[in-house]
Amino acid sequence: MASAFRNVFGDVSPVPEGTGILFNHAGSSLAEQSLVEDKVASLREDPDAAQAFLSGRGGSYLPEEMRRMVRHKLLMSYGDNFFKKRKYQEAQDKYTEAISARTANAFQIPISSKDGGVRSDVYITMCKSDVWQGITLMESYNTIAQCLVKLNKRELALDWLAEVDTLVRNITLTFETPIFDWFSHHLDARRYYLAILTTANYAADIFFELGNTGAAVHRRWSCQTMITMINAKYDRGEMEAAASLHKLYEVMEMRHPEPRLVPKLEVIDDALQVRGSWQKIEVRKSKTGGFPPSRHGFASCVWNGRFYICGGEKRQDSVGLRDLWSISLRTPESGWKRLPDYPIPNNVTGPLIGYSMVVHKDRAHLFTGRPSIDYFDLKAEKWGLIPARYDAGGSRDWPYRGRSVTDYAMCVVGGKIYVFGGYAKENPLGCNFFMVLDLSRRDLQWERLSGKTGALEADHSCPGPRKHVSSWVNKEQDRIYIMYGEADRQGAFIAGDTHHGKMTSYSYEDIWGWSIPERRWRRERVSGNIPCPRSEMACTYNSTLNKTIVFGGYSPTLPTVYRETQDQFAFSYYADTFIYEPSTSPEGRSKWKQVITRGFPTYRAQASLVSDPKTGKIFLFGGYANSEYIAYEKELTSRTYNDLWQLKIDIPGGYFEGVDMEEESRTARAGPLQRCFTCGNTGHWKKCGGTCKGRAFFCDSDCQREGWKEHKQMHKCTKVL
């Protein structure tokens, strides 16, 4: 692998350290650095000479590269002076001018990606010839972001910090031999480390201010991880200070959302936040259906205003469910309807867990890892089978050994079913195999598009191997997106994979887009108030709103600590909600916003989030969480759900009319906890026993006495005689 890095770092060899890969480099000499410092110091003493130098009338005896370095450092010092005087706009202007001087105006800053992708040929070319220029830009981007924070321009600040992440990613794209994302890579340079830690620190502060505690933990935990791998010759105290590492332990003690913060959170930045409301739907027991058991790992779809669920399991290590249910999304209170169970026996498909369904022409298509596709005729309410085969360049060997794959992403576009990733027996880590089935053909056959199921190789041109990945299709129906997911390194370790396996799995933090016309992948730029890396999250594309919404999920790597109970978890479950707004112009950027709600469903993973295409309403059903994490019965390893919720968002068409945020701040459930109507504290409180039927909870008798009069007036509650 060493030869892959010589173009960037000089004629050196990689040095393994920790779980990452450390690269030495050839840098500028101490004499050159000293000469630049001396020249800048002399110019600072002579303003006229400094102005002449910046105008190009001085320093002709210096090499051009060194003149650019002097101009950059001189202008940065001017910016620092403005910053100390709290003249943040003037400081930003000088920092921007310094960047232009360093790059000789060779390209626009920040880099404008015409196609929206992370890859930048400008950055790659620059870093191949001079990686120090890339590090200098990283430092400069951070200073501009710091100015923007002071100017309360959080969205722009996050854009500049995201530009640092993009630049770092492009440094890895200069490698001739790609490496998997879970293998961290380090350039053995103090300034490089400090720049990355500073970026993460600034971003964590912004996310925390916005109430995005999950992203704040992720950034601070990544700092902790990096510092443990840094060469011992560097000052650890300096690195910890750059990362503000002392703030890590505060956010590690929070859940996401944190119940103590939720009642106080306000929308402080319309560009990065939006108000919302989670409202639980009370479903009556129908005469014909009853209630579906609680579950996770089930398939689901929406057709003609009805929501369908199929299979899954009620608890871990159970046989699994093979039932099919539906409920009207227009009148959900009318109850569930039981439909014919899935007829294929367990010995053919295995447990009906981790599969997906998509609707095409009044049929719900179910893919179980076999070449043939099962379907449920939504009009006739009968099951059927569509025979299909596989053909990849003459080979007809089905790529999934044992004809089984689960936890994949599936969508249907233009009459074609696309399947990506998932868990296959060939590779417990997860795979990145991507294939398509054209339903319009008489002789149906699967076609491979990219990736593998078996022995994996790192490839920067397509997504890495993963399972539990989210996906959606854009409004124009010409691009398929996949987001996040998990590389199950723990599963690989247990299976005996000593290279990729590890006792801690890896959560991706990327979004990829597959261009259907061009038949190629592109790693997308991510900006705004983003969800932290996770897998098993609920995701839906709402065609009425032209937005993607995600909820909850699970991280196998980001820890949670509870000081009060002395509990420590090496993982986290989520109940936060985010909305993705695609760009409306070629020059614009798509971005994420967090949906700020007063109450929320319990922390969970593997729930189903769906949208009704005709009404635009958004619903959540099912899922699971670790029992200890949410303080349920200790003897249970997990808790599953069968509750139904509706999400309302304060945007046109979001059904937010009539939402009373003030009342919700006092009565809405905070995940598994109740909120005291009087004092606002969260916990397992007792509900009011009056005629309000539990609209309010009180933490003790004092709060009940104090708040009773107001509760009685607000909710028309009286004592039950």
Image (cartoon, rainbow, N blue to C red):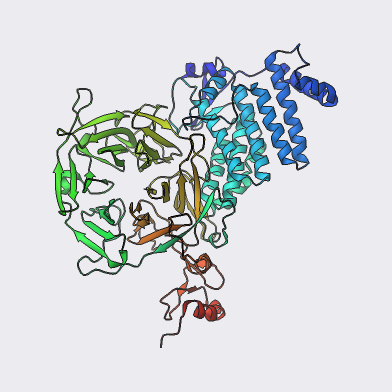
Residue 363 position, x and y percent, is 20, 47
The answer to whether one can see residue 553 in this image is no
The answer to whether one can see residue 677 in this image is yes
Snapshot quadrant of residue 615: bottom left
Snapshot quadrant of residue 314: bottom left
Q: Is 565 rendered above or below residue 361?
A: below
Of residues 653 and 228, the one drawn nearer to the viewer in this rendering = 653
Residue 122 position, x and y percent, is 54, 23
* Count of labels in the image: 0
- Left or right: residue 412 versus residue 389 is right
- Left or right: residue 356 versus residue 664 is left
Q: Is 448 rendered above or below residue 237?
A: above
Snapshot quadrant of residue 672: bottom left
Identify the image quadrant of the C terminus: bottom left
Residue 640 position, x and y percent, is 34, 58
Residue 415 position, x and y percent, is 25, 39
Q: Is 620 rendered above or below residue 200?
A: below
Q: Is 62 rendered above or below residue 682?
A: above
Of residues 125 and 87, the one drawn nearer to the viewer in this rendering = 87
Q: Residue at x 19, y 46 (%)?
A: 375
Q: Single out the residue that lies furthest toward the bottom.
A: 721
